[in-house]
Image (spheres, coloured by chain):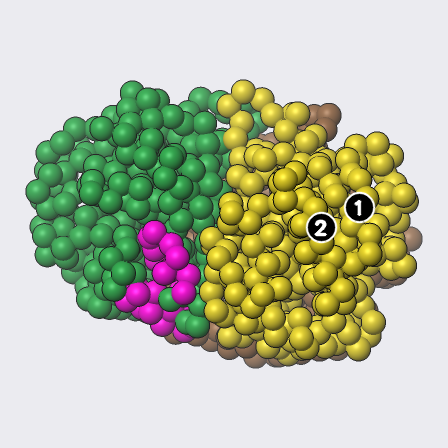
Chain colours: A yellow, B brown, C green
């Protein structure tokens, strides 16, 4: 199943419009290229509608939102909705500031997102309207663990139904649900959290996956999570003595570049709840 | 000939002002340093004139243009023209949106550029006023091939004469012409297209080459294309099992860092038409 | 002494708010993570006060300042001062343009900085109100050498007293002083200057060090300089034939990732004047 999703991405060359933060944007572009997709970045109010129109999907990431890019997010989102394009929201830092929380909530109200992907603190913020996000990282108190898994799955499913979007909550255990079915994914490495932008990369990759698999969004969003986690595992296995997070960053993107649908199918670790 | 161009760059320490996109800006800075040049980035309307004044050349790249940076491009360009500084335009995504096309055309009308460098779809857009650019990549239908080479050379020469700028069209086969003479270059690797920003890096490097060789712009612009392509070949030859586009990115910049004028002279693959 | 500073950073997980340039921001984030700190980037006037409030320290870097981010720097700085948070200024390019010089001076007048870190040309500009900074690199005529060391130490101490901030001047020889005591540091490699952003990384790292060691700012600021320089030495020792500045960039961050307090203590090369 995941094999087909990834093979479709490799062959269909999804063009993804990213309105994203300037911290991790280069890695976002390279991971899309590594997977066979094409990135374009555009965040000016006078540019985004044209750019979104020629793309297959839109990835909105609020990591370094500002007074100029916020209106561009709404304009691009409206255009993508009007054209029936796939669209994903990454609410980076929702809960860490009023502006981030309000912008993410307002985007959810005015734009229909196919997928919303964040860490547990960000997603809880979207569900409740306020949060305790510690910067851009999840609050440890929120973590999805084996103990809290059942309640976390229920929370994700409920939010998915309420929002009308696939919800992807990523962390040590990842959840991807359409309200009915929930993929519980255990790929990845804890060291991925010591690289900036693995979450941003995943959001971009997930957008590409759903663009390439428009009739199979839930499975392909889950496939993206497994692909990124598997790349983290493969990249880690290639680490040498003295390597650290900067080299690890390269090795993860390299692992996506060399990944095949078969390898993803074989390496994916998930159950469905 | 190319040896001298590169040796001049190594010894003259060209300072290049870049108004460029935030996607590939870090690689742009590092490739300039790798070649012996110095980068400075500045894109605010109140900052650019002072910065351009202390630099030897200006590299304008519209990859993430916006309402604040567009006026800064015009202001910096006017200052560079007034001072007789070298100036290059990289019309990223011209043809992909009205704003990009119009901005690039308007820049060409109001600023004199020593060189305009882009992919074939972008450059065709500049010639015709509209285009079919697929995001930031060239449309496959536009590609310069052995079959279309003669007509592409004529197109490039005609545009060069009309624009009064050296035109550099890069792709599988690269063309660099001043309207009279056209360098046809066959360095490089197709895998370079799977890294974000090799075109942006080339534009910056080319600016540095012409700053360091002010009386020899055509040859030094062609030398820059050969240098970037040769770095792509050398970088690829150092790839190990499991490496991908992220590592390749590093190896290309590393290859520029270690390149000598002699190696460039020897590795350059070109003919003149 | 430095061991304790670094061990505190490893265990205390400093959250650092960065208002920084888009050129080197990814490396800034990764070096903070490498050292055990957490980065958050935010530069919008409506976002910065909330973000600074949840962080332990604020790192202001004017490398790509603009009309939107300058007011955000003042707002964030005022908030950090009101909350008693640690705050550092990196006056990138002060002396290279009027806007950079004036902004840096105005920030110094309106905000109290715990540390100001720059190259000698930037710091001289702050002391005199104008300068000859060559882009973002120090003017060679300004360099701190063994011959000019005594007068440079006196200059740094005097400025520290006048500004009420720790002054860190980095270059071939680094000076870190609180006006009374001056650390003279000889870690590092000249090749670090051929990577964009080692200075920006150091400013971020230094902010994290002083956040984690609030009662020991001078020593921990000096420890940060030694740590970055030592990482440059370790990274260089791992360079292979054909590697260049791009790989070196990765190896330096990797070296921070693998550094221990003991290794820093042992590798630090400094005297106190």
- Disc number placed over residue A153 in the picture, else none: 2
Query: Is B110 placed left or right of C116 in the picture?
Result: right
Query: Are the numbered discs 1 and 2 placed on the same chain, yes or no?
Result: yes
Image point (74%, 76%), residue name:
A79
Dot 1 corresponds to which residue? A273
Give the percent coordinates (x, y) of residue A256.
Answer: 73, 39
Task: Work out whether residue B60 or residue C65 is closer to the camera in this orientation and state it.
Answer: C65
Q: Kindly indicate the quadrant of the structure image that contains residue C126.
A: bottom left
Give the percent coordinates (x, y) of residue C114.
Answer: 22, 52
Q: Kindly indicate the quadrant of the structure image that contains residue B163.
A: bottom right
Residue C179 in view here: yes
- Mark before the other along the chain sequence, 1 or 2: 2
Give the percent coordinates (x, y) of residue B227.
Answer: 62, 42
| Alpha carbon separation for disc pair 1 and 2 | 8 Å
Callout 2: chain: A
Q: Secondary structure at mark 2?
A: helix
Q: From the image, which quarter does the N terminus of chain B lie in?
A: top right
Rendered view: B86 above or below B4: below
Task: Work out whether residue B257 or residue B169 is closer to the camera in this orientation and state it.
Answer: B257
Callout 1: chain: A
- Disc number placed over residue B1 in the picture, else none: none
Give the percent coordinates (x, y) of residue C258.
Answer: 45, 27
Q: Secondary structure at mark 1?
A: loop
Image point (66%, 25%), residue name:
A237
Q: Kindly indicate the quadrant of the structure image that contains residue A6.
A: top right
Task: Work out whether residue B63 or residue B216 is closer to the camera in this orientation and state it.
Answer: B63
Question: Badges 1 and 2: C-beta atoms under 8 Å apart?
Answer: yes
Image point (68%, 56%), residue name:
A155
Task: Write the start and end of the magenta stretch as one range.
Answer: C50-79
Query: Is C206 placed left or right of A140 in the picture?
Result: left
For label 1, count other residues whose C-alpha is less than 10 Å away and answer few (under 14), some (14-19) or many (20+): few
């Amino acid at each position: 199943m995941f094999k087909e999703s990834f093979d479709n991405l490799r062959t269909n060359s999804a063009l993804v419009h990213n309105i994203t933060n300037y911290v991790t944007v280069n890695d976002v572009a390279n991971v899309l290229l590594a997977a066979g997709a094409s990135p374009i970045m555009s965040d000016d109010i006078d540019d985004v509608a044209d750019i979104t129109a020629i793309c297959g999907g839109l990835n909105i990431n609020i990591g370094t939102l500002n007074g100029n890019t916020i209106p561009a997010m709404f304009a691009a989102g409206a255009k993508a909705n009007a054209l029936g394009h796939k669209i994903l929201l990454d609410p980076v830092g929702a809960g860490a500031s009023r502006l981030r929380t309000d912008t993410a909530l307002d985007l959810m109200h005015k734009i229909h997102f196919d997928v919303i992907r964040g860490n547990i603190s960000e997603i809880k913020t979207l569900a409740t309207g306020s949060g305790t996000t510690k910067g851009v990282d999840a609050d440890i108190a929120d973590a999805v663990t084996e103990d809290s898994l059942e309640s976390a799955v229920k929370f994700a499913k409920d939010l998915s139904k309420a929002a009308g979007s696939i919800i992807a909550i990523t962390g040590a255990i990842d959840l991807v649900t359409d309200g009915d079915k929930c993929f519980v994914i255990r790929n990845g490495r804890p060291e991925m959290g010591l690289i900036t932008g693995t979450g941003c990369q995943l959001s971009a990759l997930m957008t590409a996956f759903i663009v390439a698999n428009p009739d199979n969004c839930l499975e392909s969003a889950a496939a993206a999570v497994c692909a990124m986690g598997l790349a983290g595992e493969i990249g880690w296995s290639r680490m040498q003595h003295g390597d650290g997070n900067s080299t690890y960053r390269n090795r993860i993107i390299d692992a996506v570049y060399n990944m095949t649908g078969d390898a993803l199918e074989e390496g994916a670790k998930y159950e469905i709840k």
